[in-house]
Every structure is written in structure tokens, then in C-alpha cells.
Image (cartoon, helix red, strand yellow):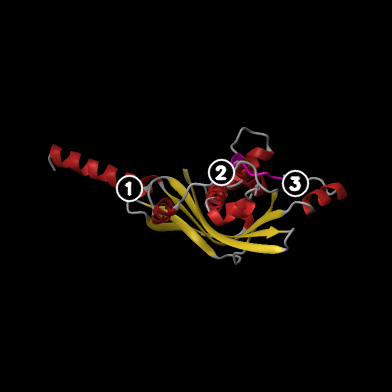
Amino acid sequence: MNQRNIMLFLFATLFIVNCAASTKNQKDYENNKKSPIALNGSKEIVFENLNFNINPFAKLGQHHDGIFKLPALPEYTWDRGFLALGIQFDSIASQELTSLGYTVTVPDTMSKSNKEIIKIAQVQFKLSGVVNYLTYDTYAPLAGNFTEASLYIIWTLCDVKSDSTFTFTTNGYGNSDGVINKSTITTYKKSEANHNLASNVLSGNIVIATGFKTALEQLLADEAFSRLLRKQ
């Protein structure tokens, strides 16, 4: 193989590796995402919780290796280990809503006083979500060196004042450089427990947290949702 062919081979290899970082899940999300709608104040809203309706040990995805991203071990199945450090979904939601001009009540999760219970009960709109579908895949250096997750969330918005319930569905996508698998998360957890300087991965798995945030952004891009919360 002469020098010209070697250079062409190396260029083609680098091109394929760079392309490997873009997956179908990412392209689907990028092609369909919309910009959230900002409000200048809103009717009061509180984010209550996010639940996962995924069968125990359901396959989420797997590791991939090589420039063609061939399936490899390990495979990833669902359990709460993916949330080993406890992602603060309520905090992420409250921050995102506030940044877009919503009037948000932030519950004191440490307080169980009657005053706190009454405060939350009096909020007109209550938002919660259920993750019904989740994918999770990791990619070795030659496959792009990243981790990605896709979430499908069913949102429920309850209007206490009119005793009405509204349902929305959105998809979210998150990725991060490097391979973040369950053993990596466990390592972060142990490091944090030992008071070492270690990233807490957005207080949990940064990929799932980002997927939740982007799914919420798509909810906030829905004109029907913002119309319900917009002040008259």
C-alpha cells in the first residue's frame, strides 16, 4: 500500500469514527425537537414526581464497539442501579420551569409539616410524569466514545381548581462523552461516600437526567401546555 492509499485509508477511518458518534436516536430527536415557549409569569405550578413504569430486568440496550458500532457485552437491563445516586428530577424540573418564566412552587422534600402539605395542596397545577420506555447504550472509543439514553414520558397535568386532567407525551434524548455504565456509577457513589473529589454525574446518571430535561423541554414547547398555564 503506497503512501497515498495509506492517507486515504486513515482519512476514511477517521471519517467513519466521527460519524459513529451520531446515532438514529440522536438524529430522530434532533429532527423533531422544538424550542420551549417562554412565559412572563404563569399560573402556579408544582412538579410532583417522576415514576418509571419499566419491567424489572427489561433490556434497555447494550455496549457497542468498533467503527461499525457492533453489539458487544455488556447488555443493560433495567433496575434502580441506573439511578444509583438519585437524580433530583424535581430540582431539574423546577429549575427548567423557572428559567422559562413559569411561577413555580418548590416543595420542601425534607419537611412533612402540615404547613408544607397545605402549601402544595393549594397549588392549582400539579405536574408529574411516567417513563414508559427507556433505551440505554454505550459506545467504546472506536465507536464514538459516548453514552446515550432515550426516554418516552407520559405527562399528567392536574388542574385542581377545575378538577381537570390533561395528558401529554414527549420523547427525550441525552448523551455524554465516555462510557457510563452501572459499574461507573457505583464507582462515583463509592468515591462520594469516601469524600473524594468525584463528579456526582448530575446527582445521578447524567445521561438519563439530560434525557429527562430534553423531554421536559419538548413538553414546554407544546402550545397547548403553555396555553393552560398562561395568565389570562
Q: Does 229 sit above or below residue 100?
A: below
Q: Give the range drawn in magenta.
A: 99-105
Front residue of this view, candidates 135 and 167: 167
The amino acid on which the numbered mark 3 sits, given as a three-letter code, is Pro
Measure the C-alpha gap from mark 1 to mark 3: 44 Å
Place residue 12 in its image quadrant. Answer: top left
Nearer the viewer's eye, disc 1 or disc 3?
3
Q: From where the camera sits, is residue 136 visible?
A: yes
Mark 3 → mark 2, Cα distance in angstroms: 22 Å
- Residue for badge 2: 38
- What secondary structure is found at the residue carrying circle 3? loop
Image coords of residue 46 (percent x, y): 70, 50
Magenta-colored stretch includes residue 103 = yes
Q: What element carries label 2?
A: loop
- Mark 1 lies on a secondary structure that is helix
Residue denoted by label 3: 107
Residue 29, position as x, y percentages in the image: 44, 53
The label number, if any, that marks residue 10 in the structure image? none
- What residue type is disc 1 on? Cys
Q: Which of 208 and 29 is in front in this view?
A: 29
